[in-house]
Amino acid sequence: MDREPEPGDGQKDREGHFPPPLPGRGFGDYPGVMLKVGDPAPTFSLLDQAGEVVNLSDFAGRKLLVYFYPAADTPGCTTQSCAVRDARQDLSSLGVDVVGISPDVPEDQLKFDEKFGLGFPLLADTDHAIAEAYDVWGEKMNYGKTYMGIIRSSFLIDEDGRIEQAWYKVSPKDTVPNAQKALAGG
């Protein structure tokens, strides 16, 4: 990169991090407000690990658990994704499909899927536009450095494409229990 990125321009800096958005500026069609129960789920059309396009509308008539994770094949993301894999049959019997979304490219998603036998769509949100629409792209800190990235979160979307439950800043181990509790009416 020949220049330093400007705040809000969506370009990574020399260290591979995104600058913070401009103050008061929302992202995409959504103003950066946390989604609430009853809100329409932001639509998506993303490539999965096989290079196939997956749309939110593909799941119309079924519930969908969407979980956002920071990076494929990292410890927390592996814990979260394997827990979803292990609960997938139970979720499916309740009429719930699952997709994971991260900023990884499809090739990295495929390696992650193959390594852990996940067996469900892992979607590549490489420009983080969908993460922004769900308000899960934000400022993070690691080892004293501030950067922009995925804030681990999950959403249960109902059969009509509305948010049934939203869990922001979840622990990797809580994605499945949260969904199971919501599906049980709790």
Image (spheres, rainbow, N blue to C red):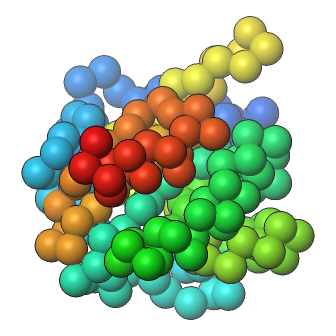
Q: Check the picture and name the quadrant holding the C terminus.
A: top left
**125 is higher (above) or lower (below) than 33:** below
Looking at the image, residue 103 lies above or below residue 152: below
As drawn, which residue projects farthest toward the top?
A: 144
Q: How many marks?
A: 0
The image quarter containing residue 130 is bottom left
Counting from the top left corner in percent of width and height, residue 128 is at: 49, 53
Instruction: Identify the residue at horizontal 73%, vertical 40% (top origin).
Output: 76
Give the residue displayed 35% in from the left and 77% down from the top.
Answer: 95
Q: Quadrant of residue 112?
A: bottom right
Task: Looking at this view, name the residue that lies furthest to the left.
Answer: 38
Residue sitting nearer the eye, 44 or 12: 44
Residue 43 horizontal side relative to residue 48, left or right: left
Classify residue 82 as left or right of residue 164: right
Residue 38, percent from left and from top: 11, 51
The vertical placement of 135 against 148, above or below, is below
Quarter of the image where one finds residue 51: bottom right
Tell me the quadrant of the picture where the N terminus can be found. Answer: top right
Residue 141 appears in the rendering: yes
1 sits to left or right of 147: right
Asked whether 132 or 92 is in front, the reply is 92
Task: Work out whether residue 152 can be spotted.
Answer: no
| Relative image position of residue 62 (x, y in whole percent) | 29, 79
In the rendered image, residue 143, in percent from the top left (x then y), is placed at 79, 14
Q: Nearer the viewer, residue 179 or 143?
A: 179
Residue at 24% x, 82% y: name it: 60
Vertical position of residue 12 compared to residue 109: above or below = above
